Image (tube, grey):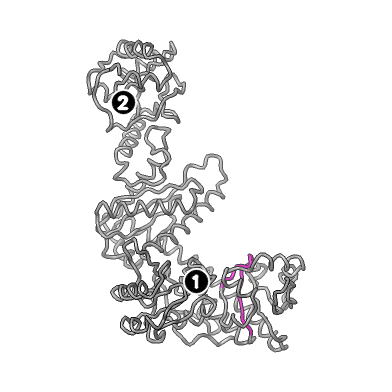
Amino acid sequence: MIRHMSSHPARGLSRVLDDLGPSLLDLLLGDPESAAELGGVGIHDPHDEQHYPERAVVLGVGVHGAAEIARLMRTLTGADAAALVVRGPVDTAALEAVADETGIALLALTRGASWAQLAAMLRTLLSEGDVGGAGEQTLGGVPSGDLFALANAIATLLDAPITIEDRSSRILAFSGRQDEADPARVASILARRVPERYRRIHEEHGVFKELYRSEQPVHIPPPTLGDEVALPRVAIAVRAGDEILGSVWAALREPLTKEREEAFKEAAKLVALHMLRFRAGADAENRLRADLVATALEGGSGAVGALGRLGLADEPLLVMALGLEPPGDGDHAQVTAERQRLTGALAVHLTAVQPRSAVALLGDVAYALFPVPDDSASARERAVQVAADFLQRTGGRGGALVGIGSVAPEPAALARSRTNADRALRVLSCGPGNGHGSGTRRVAAISDVHIDALLLEMRDLAVANRDELSGPLARLTAYDRRHNAHLVETLRAWLDAFGDVIGASASVFVHPNTFRYRIRRVAEVGQIDLQDPSARFAAMLQLRLMGLYDGGGGARAGGEPTSGGKPESVGDLKSGRPTDK
């Protein structure tokens, strides 16, 4: 059994440096042993209000120069941060006094490594997503699911740097001493996956076929790639029954002894147990998080406890609802996978912006609990901007839409915030086809689409009551069906143009004189007084509620789609007589 592991606390800065340095991080200033348990990862943004976890490792993206770094370190003292990571080179001599003053450790990100990669690995190490876990469990003396500790343990047994990879050659974890390997291994660590050129060579030589067929370690000679010098490899598949979970790779300077080959085989079995436990733990955590978010959204007696376990107690929240446009005849499995992908992407995005956010997929909609400072217009606008940034980064794939609810100052108000988020999402998903949607807009707060949401609910009530067209609209629709007279279309265009005959006639492509004749016929056939503001409002409202707008915004007369622009909202309708502008 493997017993070796890092002697440093799993969530300590020393442990982070053991696992990620010097491949990704170098300690410049500070004492990592004096730092308390790390609370998570924060990303510095000089143009936004900052919310960091306690004892955070803050990523200073774009922070350069001793003066700027010193200012940020002093600022982070008030936020109780533990460490600051910047891109080198750094003038450490100019910052020694600041490090002593603030107690914040200063680290440098290795050239060629990405901030996104570092953030992902730090979050993996710190297990920032844990909620309400039980006591720590171990497998083979290594904390359950801790692949980095296991990689270090195997590296000690084999006296060689180790990587643990999945079936797609993505690096799940790696040991220390990677600087003792070759450029190919360094490139793999920096990219967090094996470079394609090396993977292609392995495929051409049948390495993966042999690896997944054999239960023995597979010895791989160094590839020939120009002037690059590479070390031989030994790899072994990680199996759980008939399922291949991944593989473990060692870069060797000396051949393995028989004893070390046996130890490698035993280690692969232990890696399988850890990968299965890690996968099961992630599934259980996702289910638990979804249950906690669902309980909080109900706003009942259990909401306070659920928010406490999520770390969201005692602060205002608003609910975001992420949905997809109706898929039509699309593949249901593909739509489900896309929902899950977007849910995970939203969780990563919100965590970078506001680490205390919580996201869960409930049915067909992903809900996010997003902390805000207060119920101010700026706080709501900030939430809209965060959601818009997310959709922009995901490229609008899958027709994603985000509705944002009202601010909930207390847990009991979360149910209302969820309802309002659903209402805003429905307005977006209805689109312009029913005259209610917001066109190409993909994000909306309920405060911005409240009238449209009310109209949809009024239409639902009309449908539930089986209301039918009556009054002027009924007479005009019946006349159009018999005579194809386009009177409903004419009324709609005139109302949309606020009585401007020239503009209205142009929107339906008829001569102004023809339009004047038709609007007179509207008044006669429909028996409607177009000079009466109440009559005009009733006509516009009925057009909306009965769904008499096609996908282009035009009214249907006798079932025939019509041309014309998108109608204005009910609130925009103003009184006025037909004019000859």
Q: Position of residue 205 (x, y in %)?
A: 77, 68
Which residue is located at x 32 percent, y 67 percent? 308
- Report helix, strand or loop for mark 2: helix
Is the N terminus in the top left, top right, bottom left or bottom right quadrant?
A: bottom right
Question: How many labels sit on residues?
Answer: 2
The residue identified by callout 2 is: 540
* Amino acid type of the residue tagged 2 in the rendering: Met
* Amino acid type of the residue tagged 1 in the rendering: Met
CA gap between label 2 and label 1 equals 57 Å
Residue toward you, 325 or 101: 101
Is the C terminus in the top left, top right, bottom left or bottom right quadrant?
A: top left
Residue 366 image label: none
Q: Position of residue 460 (x, y in %)?
A: 35, 35
The residue identified by callout 1 is: 121
Q: Quadrant of residue 512?
A: top left
Q: In the figure, is residue 379 to the left or right of 333? A: left
Which residue sits furthest right? 205
In this picture, is 577 found above or below 158? above
Q: Quadrant of residue 31?
A: bottom left
- Report helix, strand or loop for mark 1: helix
Asked if the magenta segment contains residue 167, the reply would be yes
Q: In the figure, is residue 44 to the left or right of 523? A: right
Which residue is located at x 22 percent, y 23 percent? 533
Q: Quadrant of residue 316?
A: bottom left
Q: Position of residue 234 (x, y in %)?
A: 70, 78
Q: Position of residue 61 (x, y in %)?
A: 43, 67
Q: Residues within 10 Å of mark 2 (few under 14, many from 20)?
A: many
Which residue is located at x 47 percent, y 54 percent? 393
Q: Which residues are magenta?
A: 160-172
Residue toward you, 327 or 92: 92
